[in-house]
Amino acid sequence: MSEAAALEGTGPAALEVTGLAAGYGRVLALHGVGLRVPAGSVTAVLGANGAGKTTLLRAISGVLRPQAGRVLIDGDDVTGRHPEDMARLGVAHVPEGQGVIAELTVEENLRLGALWRRGHGPRKQALDQAYQRFGVLAGARRRAAGTLSGGERQMLVIARALMAQPRVLLLDEPSLGLAPRIVAQVMQLTAELRDAGLAVLLVEQNARSALSIADQGIVLNLGKVVAAADAATLAADVGLRQHYLGF
Amino acid sequence: MAEFGELTLGGISVGMIYAAIGLSLVLIWRATRILNYAQGGMAMLTTYIALTVINHTGSYWAGFAAALAAGLVLGAVIERVVIRPVESKPPLNAIVVTIGLLILIEGLAGIIFGGQYRSFPAAFSITGLHIGSAALGISSNDVFVTVAVLIAALLLAAGFRYTRAGLRLRAAAFSPQVSRLLGVRVGRTLTLGWALAGLIGALAGVLISPSIFLYPNSMDAIFVLGFTAAVIGGLDSPGGAVAGGLILGVALNYVSGYLGSDLVPLFGLAALTVVLMLRPSGLFSTAPARRV
């Protein structure tokens, strides 16, 4: 896929962002960022610390109110909606680091992900599916989530996000602090979710493993997109790798 | 020895009142990290409402129900109108607001109901119970007080543990940001928390008022002891608040019985000071100490 196709494409993508600007107080951390994530694809968001990667996810999921630009889900403008509404609109944002609620049990964390859904049936079904997919969680359902290992916690927050049956998954640094073997598992899982039809926006410091599963990627620097292309092209660009990606 | 038993039983019943006030403070503290200084004033107001209903209908239980309903509504309205604007502000703002609210409520009660002491009826007989010829030191009404708070505490615990609203309340208390991302409407959850606190506070007001008379400042001392109960329990723990209330109630009843009832407020404040100095995160807390 060419750069132009990756950014523009045709027809509504599951997630489309145009000219997004956001920040903290008067300081903008994001200056007019655009991207498209079609259903069934992974877009990696790469760049150094402070490039605006986390801010981008926060502006999409409504944690931060965008100061300019638009966020479209399946073509519908949802710019500036609150995060609790975005969850209902099919956007699941898995924040970086300690997203588990340590004081609650594993099962309570999972249930929380589908609490807004109507009807006991769908909630129960989502829980059964989570345990089926994540056997390690099924064995720990009554344990406090705070007692899980780092890898198990990452599985829990992703499983919890899936409880809402989202169409768009925003993953913020899922490999952070995890052993290489676990990172590979998380990437494998992300690829499976893509194959199941999710649109995944994957923020990663670990560019090499992110590009190994991504379809497209964008590189942010100081809140601006400095490169956007399909993953193989980005991975092959020696200059880009040396300047921004560090591998 | 018989006296010791009487004092213990009597202490349990009054301790349950402190426990209820402590519980209402814990509910609010957990949800919003705000200490509600107006909790006693709110309970006083709902008790006046109960008294008015009792005088009009002649039914204690109608007044009892009216107080609980009024507490629920009052808690929700105060959170929505007064507390919501200061929730994201520095803690001092909320402290000033709840103290201001206390003064406002007590002033309003004085204007509407007058400042004179009124007696408030008890639900059951207040004459002491006996086993054979041995006095137990408690009345049927004391038993009712203990059972009522116990039931309220157990219902609350079960609600928190087993209902979806309870899960929301806990999740929003532990991690509001994550909860919002998962679709929890945290604002509504906070309103519910304050409403429940208003209800428990109203229960405490109705239960204690037969023994202390009702007047605009009548709950001030009870509030301080309820706060002490909550602090003994760690301010974060509903179970701790109940245990703290029982410990305090029994200990202060020994003080009253062996040393004189004049010393009760002094020892209550001393207990608060000592706990804050030595175990600021509470006797039952394993969390690191926190500035209060």
Image (cartoon, helix red, strand yellow):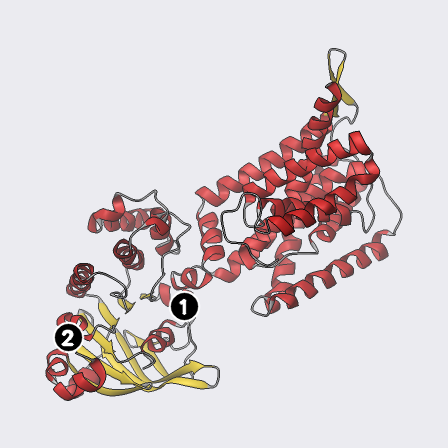
Give the residue type that dot 2 points to: Asp
Q: Is residue A9 left or right of residue B262?
A: left
**Residue occupying image coordinates x 34% and y 42%:** A142
Cα gap from disc 2 to disc 1, whole angstroms: 27 Å
Residue at position x 21%, y 80% from top?
A245
Residue B154 visible in the snapshot: yes
Q: Name the foreground residue: A171 vs B104.
A: A171
Chain of the residue where label 1 is placed in the rendered structure: A
- Toward which corner of the image does residue B12 lie, by quadrant? top right
Residue, disc 2: A215
Residue marked by disc 1? A83
Instruction: Name the residue rendered at 28%, 63% in the picture.
Output: A166
- Residue at the front extreme? B278
- Relative height, residue A178 to residue A42 (above, below): above
Q: Earlier in the sequence, mark 2 or mark 1?
A: 1
Q: Residue at x 52, y 59 (%)?
A: B188
Looking at numbered disc 1 in the image, what kind of residue is underneath it?
A: Pro
Q: Within 10 angstroms of label 2, few (less than 14), some, or many (20 or more) residues? A: many
Secondary structure of residue under mark 2: loop
A177 relative to B281 in the view: left or right: left
**Dot 1: few (<14), some (14–19), or many (≥20) neighbours within 10 Å?**
many
- Cβ atoms at labels 2 and 1 below 8 Å apart: no
Residue A8 visible (yes or no):
no
